[in-house]
Image: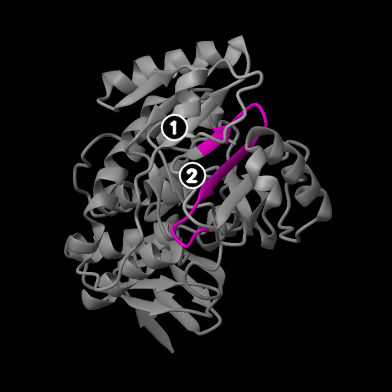
Amino acid sequence: MTKTADAIVIGGGIIGCSTAYNLAKLGCKKVVLIEEKYLASGATGRCGAGVRMQWGTEPNCLLSRDSIHMFENLEEELGYSDSIEFKQSGYLLLAYNEKAVEQFHKNLGLQHKLGIPSRWVTPEEAGELVPHLNLQGLHGATFCAQDGHCNPFKATDAYAVAAKRLGVEILTYTRVTNLLKDGDNIKGVETTAGTIEAPMVISCAGSYTRELGRMVGVDIPVHPERHQILVTEPVEPLQGPMVMSFYHGIYCQQVPHGGFVMGLGDPNEVKDYNTDSTWHFMQEMAAKITFILPVLKELRVVRQWAGLYDLTPDKTQILGAVAEVPGFFVAAGFSGHGFMIAPVVGKLMAEVMLGKEPDYPIDMYGFQRFASGDLYVEPSVV
């Protein structure tokens, strides 16, 4: 039996749930969200869940700045009776060589132009912010007190609950098996639960977006890459800011329940869908983090896991309409920072899909930029 809808959202992470909510909020009557497993089962539920304004390109600064302001009031905006556990204890980004110092000062100039309250701190000032920080080799750091952390499951649930309240139908444990076209135009989707026809379909499916694009003859340059994370046993409050080192490729924060969540980027990762955990990760993570934060060497690891970054060649997201297939839209390729910009992305995508003028243009995020060479290379990604 064929169902009909006005818009179909593929992907039940926070990007998909935010987009579905905003579509319904703007008056789209019949919105269907399709998720292969459970909500937040993909990249959203496996992320480090940090949120920061400290980026090196204007698009990412704007999206994260405005999203953090939305996170601050998200429970009220969505009428959520629970807590999304949003805390703003800051991000401390460490610089270990002159190249990083130069880049960080360039980033600060951009951030200040956009009203982001970040600042340069000396090694000694960094030690005051995180007293157990090892200052050996540290040239300085940047700090923004409004950066922070949020519970990804709660935030996704908040959008899903609000979306359902507005009439959005959410289909979990339902897989999209094909995208349908009528001529060049999108026509709908085939799923394991049947066919749904709609004039608009958006992929919020992370690295699986490339597979969806191929179903309609479009090559969208998004690749999966495994990133591993671990969490320690909970202890008394010890660290406020997220500590991040691009030099070491790591980040580490103490979350509200007391455990330390930390992740590591490996430049040698193969671009595939592997989400297995490894002993190599734990060993490398332990060696690097106990150099930067020596006091953590006494903590026991509770568990580790892996998730997928959906990477683009310039580590900047792909947003907007696919010109070759009218009615098909993409919000993917977030390269590890989709969670933190989801509030604004969902709003912008809903506006674009419904033909409204977005708060600020998103043309620069189109995937056509990879053919033209107009890239937005983000220098501040772990």
Label 2–label 1 contact, CB within 8 A: no
Q: Is 233 left, or right, of 327 in this rendering? A: right
Mark 2 lies on residue: 239
Q: Which of 302 and 218 is in front in this view?
A: 302
Q: Is mark 2 on a helix, strand or loop?
A: loop
Q: Where's residue 227, x and y in %?
A: 66, 49
Q: Can residue 83 be seen in this view?
A: yes
Image quadrant where one finds the C terminus: top right
Q: Where's residue 115, x and y in %?
A: 25, 25
In the depicted structure, whether residue 133 falls above or below residue 300: above
Task: Name the residue type under label 2.
Answer: Gln
Point out the residue furthest to the right here: 280
Alpha carbon of mark 2 to alpha carbon of mark 1: how far?
Answer: 9 Å
In the depicted structure, whether residue 246 falls above or below residue 75: above
Q: Where's residue 194, x and y in %?
A: 49, 84
> Could you tell me which residue is drawn at 53 percent across and 52 percent down?
48
Q: What stretch is highlighted in magenta?
A: 243-258
User: Which of the numbered marks, if any, corresponds to residue 129?
Assistant: 1
Q: Nearer the viewer, residue 363 or 74?
A: 74
In the depicted structure, whether residue 375 falls above or below residue 322: above
Q: Is 184 left, or right, of 83 in this rendering? A: right
> Could you tell me which residue is drawn at 47 percent across and 80 percent down?
195
Q: Nearer the viewer, residue 148 or 310?
A: 148
Q: Is 168 left, or right, of 189 in this rendering? A: left
Q: Is mark 1 on a helix, strand or loop?
A: helix
Q: Is 203 left, or right, of 28 in this rendering? A: right
Task: Name the residue type under label 1.
Answer: Leu
Which quadrant of the view contains residue 138? top right
Q: Does the magenta stretch include residue 109?
A: no
